[in-house]
Amino acid sequence: LKIKNLRKTYESKKKAQIQALRGVSLSFSEKGLVFILGKSGSGKSTLLNLLGGLDRPTSGEVIVAGRSSNNFSEKDFDAYRNNYVGFVFQEFNLIDNYTVGDNVALALALQKKKTSKKDVDPILKELELTDDKGDTLYDRHINELSGGQKQRVAIARALIKDPKIILADEPTGALDNETGIELYELLKKLSSNKLVI
Ligand code: ADP
Ligand code: MG
């Protein structure tokens, strides 16, 4: 994954232009944990959204496996977002009145792929989403989980797609310190065979 001379200019309602990214070039390795640091408003979310194909740059390129996404069709973008990248957000973005299992399965249901408990449970186990009896939290409702558990469900939802890249935007922002550290340990573990940004 590479970016070349990436610019993003937003036009606000009053027609004032906001230059969120001013020509950023970067090259990411295939695996590992990468941190993007900067104060609020410095363009971190803008960059992640462009890397994930959620938004388009004003100019410059995102290059995926040697191919510029400027040449992607809508279908290519769908495939990229569906199979190549997984997102984890600060506010979890889970559906509160669905179960854990349904939230995870939704990631594939949107691509018309069926998922069963048998597919989801190993991921929940890997992420230690289990109760004291060792059963997974598959049938638990989201509002019955702690913040750290919710964020791990969001990671499970990303992992079910087996993406090459995980994009996490301030994933510990809504967690207490200790839970945040645990979450980073988990992302570090995942980064041994994925790119985690
Ligand atoms: P960060 O995630 O580092 O806090 P952002 O990428 O969210 O920064 O924002 C970068 C800059 O772009 C900020 O000045 C922000 O106000 C502006 N911005 C972000 N999204 C929009 C938008 N949709 N429309 C206009 N300006 C935006
Ligand atoms: Mg942000």
Image: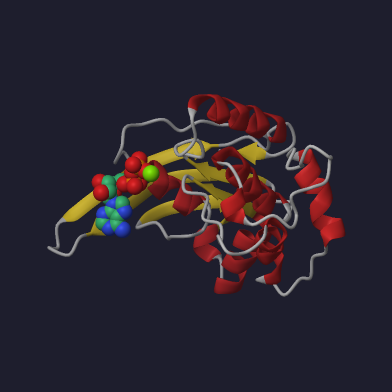
Toward the right, the furthest residue is: 118
Toward the bottom, the furthest residue is: 112
Q: What x and y, as percent, mark residue 114?
A: 79, 70
Q: Answer with left or right where residue 38 lies relative to residue 63.
A: left
Q: In the image, what residue occupies the spot 72% across and 59% down?
A: 101
Q: Answer with left or right where residue 27 lies relative to residue 159.
A: left
> Is residue 32 visible in the rendered structure shown here?
no
Q: What x and y, as percent, mark residue 66?
A: 63, 50
Q: Residue 131 lies in what quarter of the image?
A: top right
Q: In the image, what residue occupies the spot 59% across and 29% down?
A: 184
Q: In the image, what residue occupies the spot 69% across and 55% down?
A: 140
Position of the N terminus by quadrant: top right
Near-viewer residue (148 or 154): 148
Q: What x and y, as percent, mark residue 32?
A: 65, 31
97 lies above or below 45: below
150 lies above or below 196: below
Near-viewer residue (9 or 151): 151
Position of the C terminus by quadrant: top right
Near-viewer residue (185 or 137): 137
Q: Residue 84 lies in what quarter of the image?
A: bottom right
Q: What x and y, as percent, mark residue 69?
A: 53, 59
Colour convention of the picture? secondary structure
Q: In the image, what residue occupies the spot 56% across and 62% down?
A: 95
Near-viewer residue (144 or 190): 144
